[in-house]
Image: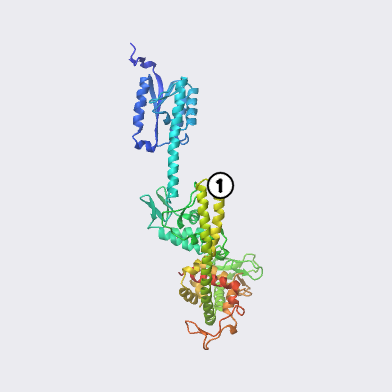
């Protein structure tokens, strides 16, 4: 005797599969997989289907069919079992897709292998009217999805225009109650990194190493990673740190509600250094070898090629040697001979105390003269910047009103950005503003009292900078000893000024802190130290060597 269920013989029941899906937000709204499965199973049983397989997809959005492996698995299962499976049941049509085009493609693919797509809560079928209603329901699902997306986009844009970010807080900051605040663990370190980068004495790779040594790490996916040069470059390119929000999605630049870390002036100064436009801050690169600090700096007197160095293993110890890469002579020079002779050469070119005192007086005059010129320059630049900011604000307003397209806005804003950068640089003299003149002069006297001692106590990169500043063409080894070594004009002027330019004693002279009185200050016409074309070079060279390069703040 046949067993019937709803008038259908159980043995003759058709096979069906269920597809249930939830995204994260739907799980919160009690739109659970269990609820969908229960309703789909009841509807399948009522229609005389036997459920043979259940496909569950959790935490997946229906905005697109990409990234939904269970849906792909369902379609493949239906293709392989098209002779037995007759229907796919879903709780609602939007479980398949919230895009009308995607839904219709999937439905057509299933219909092509004789499988119906049935909703447990909506009218679906193969009649013309049911197909129309089904298409309309799919369209309503896309409409609902599009409206939600538009609201989300408008909300994000409104948040951006109000000066708040929605993504991850940049290094040095953290989120608290929806707002960006200073991260007490890293804010000061990142701020110090900006100051160090603004000096122009470090490249991106060196900065990454320094920041890592400070213990600052980048957090990704809950894990901490060391900073790389690319990450540091991205940090130094962000206007966020000067209090401005930018976005790849929106053309506007708005003032953020977060505390700024640096000034606008410092930001553009760093941009200039990164772009390689400011040649005054560019230090020559060298492949450093702590065992042979004079390689490439000391050159062969016969061919002009820089020396290299190597170790030779003896019976009891290793012995270091410098030698010409072209092997112009048949022997190598002991490492100790070359380096000891260099110290003697540095003692020879060390400025005498009176000469150094003269330079300190000139340095003071240049410092205050430059401060006066800087103030005048700042007043002019500030007026120009106010005009540029007004133009940019007008440009933003016209873009928001639709008078300027986003493309036109970006083009015009880029031109204004370049003008603002130039105006900021025209009033920038960060080194003058950062360091105390008395500390600079005291330190300069101490370090240039004995160049050989300063060289010995310096680190390898500092040694290279010091030597290249004194001997811009390197030193020449003439087998034996150094000869024909060109000394930079700066050091020549300090080491051997003309006697007529200064003298000790006399009334009405300029008295130094050490008691040396300069009776007459060198004029621009009589002293190369006061050559207007060299004034800034002299000042920057000694200031950089004395305070930054040799590592004293």
Residue 418, by quadrant, is bottom right
In the image, 552 versus 92, the foreground residue is: 92
Residue of label 1: 407
Position of 426 with respect to 15 (left or right) is: right
Q: Quadrant of the N terminus?
A: top left
Q: How is the image coloured?
A: rainbow
Residue sitting at 62 percent across and 72 percent down?
477
x 57%, y 54%: residue: 415
Q: Report the front residue among 459 and 303.
A: 459
- In the current view of this chain or complex, which residue is farthest to the top? 1
- Mark 1, secondary structure of its residue: helix
| Residue sticking out furthest to the bottom | 506
**Label 1 crowd bin: few (<14), some (14–19), many (20+), radius 10 Å:** few
- Return the x and y of residue 151 as percentages of the image width and height: 43, 40
Rendering coords of residue 217 (x, y %): 42, 55
| Residue 65 placement (x, y as % from top left) | 47, 34
Q: Nearer the viewer, residue 398 or 58?
A: 398
Q: Position of residue 536 (x, y in %)?
A: 56, 71
Picture quarter with the C terminus: bottom left
């Amino acid at each position: 005797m046949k067993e019937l269920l709803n008038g259908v013989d159980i043995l003759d029941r058709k096979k069906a599969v269920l597809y249930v899906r939830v995204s994260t937000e739907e799980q919160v709204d009690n739109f659970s997989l269990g609820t969908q499965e229960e309703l789909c199973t009841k509807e399948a049983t009522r229609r005389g289907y036997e459920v043979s397989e259940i496909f569950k997809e959790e935490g997946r959005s229906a905005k697109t069919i990409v990234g939904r492996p269970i849906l792909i698995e369902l379609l493949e299962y239906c293709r392989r079992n098209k002779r037995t499976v007759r229907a796919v049941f879903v709780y609602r049509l939007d479980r398949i897709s919230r895009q009308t085009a995607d839904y219709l493609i999937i439905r057509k693919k299933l219909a092509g292998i004789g499988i119906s797509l049935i909703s447990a809560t909506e009218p679906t079928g193969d009649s013309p009217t049911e197909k129309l209603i089904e298409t309309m329901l799919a369209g309503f699902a896309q409409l609902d999805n599009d409206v939600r997306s538009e609201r989300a986009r408008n909300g994000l844009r409104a948040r951006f225009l109000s000066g708040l970010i929605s993504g991850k807080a940049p290094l040095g900051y953290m989120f608290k109650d929806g707002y960006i605040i200073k991260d007490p663990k890293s804010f000061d370190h990142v701020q110090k990194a900006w100051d160090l980068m603004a000096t122009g004495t470090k490249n991106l790779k060196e900065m990454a190493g320094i920041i890592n040594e400070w213990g600052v790490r980048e957090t990704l996916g809950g894990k901490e990673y060391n900073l790389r040069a690319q990450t540091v470059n991205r940090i130094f390119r962000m206007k966020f740190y000067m209090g401005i929000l930018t976005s790849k999605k929106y053309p506007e630049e708005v003032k953020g509600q977060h505390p700024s870390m640096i000034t606008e002036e410092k930001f553009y100064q760093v941009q200039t250094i990164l772009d390689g436009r400011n040649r005054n801050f560019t230090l020559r690169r060298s492949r450093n070898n702590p065992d042979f600090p004079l390689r490439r700096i000391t050159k062969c007197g016969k061919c002009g090629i820089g020396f290299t160095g190597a170790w030779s293993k003896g019976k009891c110890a290793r012995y270091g040697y410098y030698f010409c890469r072209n092997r112009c002579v048949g022997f190598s020079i002991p490492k100790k001979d070359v380096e000891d002779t260099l110290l003697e050469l540095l003692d020879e070119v060390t400025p005498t105390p009176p000469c150094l005192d003269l330079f300190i007086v000139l340095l003071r005059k240049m410092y205050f003269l430059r401060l006066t010129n800087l103030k005048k320059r700042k007043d002019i630049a500030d007026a120009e910047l106010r005009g540029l900011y007004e133009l940019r604000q007008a440009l933003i307003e016209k873009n928001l009103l639709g008078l300027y397209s986003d493309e036109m806005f970006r083009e015009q804003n880029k031109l204004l950005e370049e003008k603002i950068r130039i105006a900021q640089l025209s009033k920038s003299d960060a080194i003058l503003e950062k360091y105390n003149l008395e500390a600079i002069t005291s330190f300069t006297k101490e370090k240039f009292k004995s160049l050989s001692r300063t060289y010995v106590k310096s680190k390898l990169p500092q040694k290279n900078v010091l030597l290249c500043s004194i001997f811009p063409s390197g030193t020449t080894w003439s087998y034996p000893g150094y000869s024909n070594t060109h000394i930079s004009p700066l050091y020549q002027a300090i080491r051997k000024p003309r006697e007529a330019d200064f003298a000790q004693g006399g009334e009405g002279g300029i008295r130094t802190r050490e008691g040396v009185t300069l009776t007459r200050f060198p004029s621009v016409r009589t002293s190369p130290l006061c050559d207007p074309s060299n004034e800034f070079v002299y000042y920057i060279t000694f200031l950089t060597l004395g305070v930054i390069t040799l590592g004293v703040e």
